[in-house]
Amino acid sequence: MRIYPAIDLHDGQAVRLYKGDYNQVTGYGDPVEVALKWKEAGAKFLHLVDLDGAKEGHSLNLEAVKAIIKNANIDCELGGGIRTLAQIEELLNIGVKRVILGSIALNLDFVKEAIDKFGPEKIVIGIDCKNMKVSTHGWLDTTDIDAVDFALKLKALGIKTIIFTDIAKDGTLEGINVAQTKKMIDSTGLDIVASGGAKSMNDIKNAKEIGSFGIILGKSIYSGAIDLKKAIEEYEV
């Protein structure tokens, strides 16, 4: 199982939000320093989120992303505000390994175009949920779309990997939503990356036991609740 340390970007800095609330921000400074810290702990792949981009609908922290890739020399995936094929192309050109589509993925024709142009290994879908209903636009809106139904439609288009975030848990350190994540894994057969709320090594263990492809660690590694080096040594294969 792959462990992905998260770096959320806001105004060029590394931050964490509480439950996706832009008014509840904790700052962690220079994202390059944070990236180097996680790399030193053994991370092989970083999960980057452009929070400003997610809200505004276009990439706003590109300089920080470029700096991380150049100075930390580590594989990265990026999500947040990606709405066009041109944006995807630009991100892949600056060295982003794979691009995460969020709200725009509700447009299945766009997803198909992206897969046809860039290949399924370059496109990952982030499904953000509240009570198994899909949330969009920086978590500000919740739809009536069922997460499993949506994932199966994406699978039919050729998508292989989904990052599944329970936004009721994200940034809370309350533990991942094992039942909902397991439902996604068992119902779709896709590579599901668990995200949101991990608070202890037990969450990583649970994620692995239910068959998660990976887990994203955010607040837990910033607060010290989880020792990233130890987690990677114990659970990453």
Image: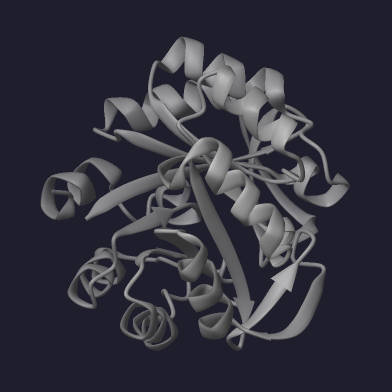
Q: Nearer the viewer, residue 165 or 96?
A: 96
Q: Nearer the viewer, residue 135 or 27?
A: 135
16 w.r.t. 72: above or below = below
Could you tell me which quadrant the N terminus lies in?
bottom left
Q: How many marks?
A: 0
User: Is residue 171 visible in the rendered structure shown here?
Assistant: no
In the image, residue 80 lies at what x, y percent?
A: 69, 46
57 w.r.t. 215: above or below = above
Q: Nearer the viewer, residue 36 or 69?
A: 69
In the picture, measured across the screen, residue 37 lies left or right of residue 67, that is: left
Q: Nearer the viewer, residue 148 or 120?
A: 120
User: Is residue 126 visible in the rendered structure shown here?
Assistant: yes
Image point (40%, 43%), residue name: 121
Image point (52%, 63%), residue name: 157
200 w.r.t. 79: above or below = below
Q: Residue furthest top?
A: 71
In the image, residue 192 lies at what x, y percent?
A: 38, 66
Image point (29%, 45%), residue name: 228
In the image, residue 131 lies at what x, y percent?
A: 61, 88
